[in-house]
Image (cartoon, grey):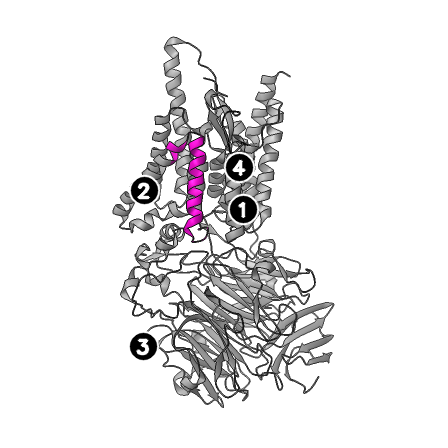
Amino acid sequence: MTQSTRQRVAQAVWTALLVASLAAVWTLNRRTVGLTAGTPVATASRYGFQLREVAKASGIDFVHQAPTFDRQLEHIMPQVASTGASVAVADFDRDGWQDFYVTNSGEGSRNRLYRNQGDGTFTDVAAEVGVADVNRPGTGVSMGAVWGDYDNDGFEDLFLFKYGRPELFRNEGGRRFVPAGEQAGLPAWVNANAATWLDFDRDGLLDLFLAGYWDERIDLWRLTTTRIMPESFEYANNGGRKYLLRNRGDGTFADVTTAMGITSRRWTLAVGTADLSGSGYPDLFLSNDYGVSELFVNQAGRGFLDVAQDAGVGRTPKSGMNASFGDVFNDGRLAIYKTNISEPGVLVQGNDLWVPKAGPAGRMEFDNLAASLGIDLGGWSWGAQFGDLNNDGNLDLYLLNGYVSAGERSSYWYDFSVIAVGHSTIIGDARNWPAMKGRSLSGYQRKRLWLNDGAGRFTDVAQVVGVSDSNDGRAVAFADFGNRGALDVVVANQRGPLLLYRNDVQPGRHWIAFDLEGTVSNRSAIGARIEVHWAGKVQAQEVAAASGFSAQNSRRIHVGLGSAGQVDRVVVRWPSGTRQEIVGPAVDRVHALKEPHGN
Amino acid sequence: MATEHVSAPGGTDVAKTPRMTLAGRRLFGIDNRFLPPLLITSILLTAHLSFGILEGWEKTGLAIATAIGTEIVLGYLTYGRIPHPASAYISGISCGILLRSPFLWPYVLCAFISILTKYVLRINGRHIWNPSNFGVSAVLFLAPQTASLLSIQWGNVVAPMVVIWTLGSVIVWRAGRFHQSATYVASFLAFSWVRAAVTGTPWLASVAPLTGPMYQLYVFFMITDPKTSVRSKWGQAATVFVVALVEMVLRLNEVVYAPFYALFFVGPAALFLEALLDARRQAPSAAPRPATA
């Protein structure tokens, strides 16, 4: 074969290869996001559960209102006023039925506390008990709330974080809430999107962690400058400070943030606590917007050390908006799910699932397995929760998304992509941000409900099982509102209606649940870890306050068991360190566990 | 006129006149072929070690390995010799830096396609698309759900930006390509003003992309690609001006990847036009012109 012939043959082969490669890109893209033709439409019965939106029928008619800030932000108001819809679940009156609190964010608007009537309906009692009128002009507006029994009286107290003055309400016997007042020692003004209760020093008293988003020196209603925006889309360090407030046990709190080694000024959108290091002390995970995540490992209650970079979870800056934990492989390891932004054709950050791996002794390391498991692409993602929705023994994942739904045929994405790459002198000044002019930014997005098959793959079944809304979702929380052994779903939408999905699980799927009450530990048992062993599996869960984005699940631990009719044993590690083992507990019922005294 | 080539950013070769022999044109004692790879590697290392721009080394490494491997195999099977790997290295690293995706396959296919175009899409013996421009554009266009472009800053400190702009300018100056970068930047700034006037967007917002790292790579490593540029200096300047003009039109239509698509269309069109003009000039005289490599 002559050289020219060889070159002609090669040319023909390379041309075919080029065409095939281009086709491969197109095909792989479609396959990756599930756009392949011929995907069978499965029936809900195949998945073992069905969700039905019943808010109205349950007496819930709440629609979230967004705030209106200083007129200098008017051109980008939908963006800067894009949070505030939240939901926090607790049995505040200890009647055995899970209730929930939802926040509103319009100036003068009212929050709601929905008391569970036990018959499938809810009644708003917020005004009656004193937690409704909390968005008065001059005090800021609500961004979220978190329940925790900080005075160990057996009734869950309510901490309200705002763009404004944070407020703590003491629960008096489930009958009324009394403001803890200025003497409690809370900061005067914090622009926060996240907070949680934790007993970081294991002294039996719940401490408070409050994470600023905007700089706390900014009053968003009375701006003295427009240089308030993040100094970078992915490297911003000009957000709000954090507050670690140690509970003194006398109704007051001490600010120990700096002393405990937390000096972050990142733009935190979500915070989660779990004992990720296995020390018995709760660690702190901060999901930050405009930057990397932070993982503060608890040094036996004497301080925190940020190991995010070394551990792998804080290397790549993204737009973190969620922090939830789940034992997705049923092997006792808690993985962290952090949500980010994915917008086709513009920005594909992908969500993260940080799964701990066995590293050298004393060193934490995580791998991001979100893409491998198929839970990475979820649009402009916000709150997410792990929970076994079909009681098959595997933790599923519910994801909310959607940023600003405005003009259906117009998008702000181009302008957003332009300003996002700008130097700090450009991006940091609100005046330089192009006007939104009624355009959407990742609006009207389809929610995800990823079902865990237990073999390393998640499948989105949202549309099939009844989740079809396209609101701008923010907070999602799980709770068994009917005490039926099924996790129901509450969804708080920004500028949208509150949704309540009733979950009907097919019969024959077993479950077990636990209500924990600390005695030596904090009474809410926040930080307790449970391991349920059954059929050769083990599932770990921890009692937590905040979970997801601006959300709190029911503190009750719920574990689906599939077809297994018995549990081998349950191991509880209380926050105090006390270990308790229960052998062969009955299934299909809620167990009330009280912390035994002593080790 | 005979033309030599040394490796250049964007996955192609820097054309050099005989006056600029490799032996005679060495910067800091380094073979000029290695300067662009060294610069882009330095930028990547600095950016990643300082700001963690990469999710991991494996994606960029995979893109580089794919590009070099493809170049070696295709070069050998087509021409019976193994090409210098610097050009493929640039193509691979460009794909590795410019693309953002949670998956590995976009990086592999981007690098593979980039190199393939050098062997397939040719006119008169020269390839007409900047390889990584084609590869990146193809992946962005065909896989919008799974891949996007580097669209972030590398930190907020001015100093690294100044260093990159300075070093980049020195490199393209040495390669005789500074006029292209300068013309493009000047055109972009002028068209930013036009865009701002048309859309009512703040001018600083219109200019903002130029302050990001993606444009630094684009200005120094992509539009200056000699193998896919026309020959005359004025023609080169005119081409990048038209690139900026088309980019403006695309931006006015809110096309996010405007610079890449603009170069994708204008670059080959300019070469095609040049080939047409060459053919017209040659037709009456029928005198053979010296071939370019």
- Are the residues flagged by discs 3 and 4 from a single subunit? no
Residue B242, percent from left and from top: 34, 33
The kind of residue on which mark 2 rests is: Leu
Q: Are marks 2 and 3 in contact (CB under 8 Å)?
A: no
Q: Earlier in the sequence, mark 4 or mark 1?
A: 4
Chain assignment, label 1: B
Quote the CA–CA distance across marks 4 and 2. 28 Å
Badge nearest the viewer, 3 or 1 = 1
Q: Chain of mark 4?
A: B
Q: For mark 4, give the secondary structure.
A: helix
For label 2, the residue is B189
**Amino acid type, label 1:** Leu
Kindly identify which residue carries mark 4.
B37
Q: Which residue is mark 1?
A: B45
Mark nearer the N terminus (4 vs 2): 4
**Separation (CA) of disc 3 from disc 4:** 58 Å
Task: Report whether B281 appears left or right of A582.
Answer: left
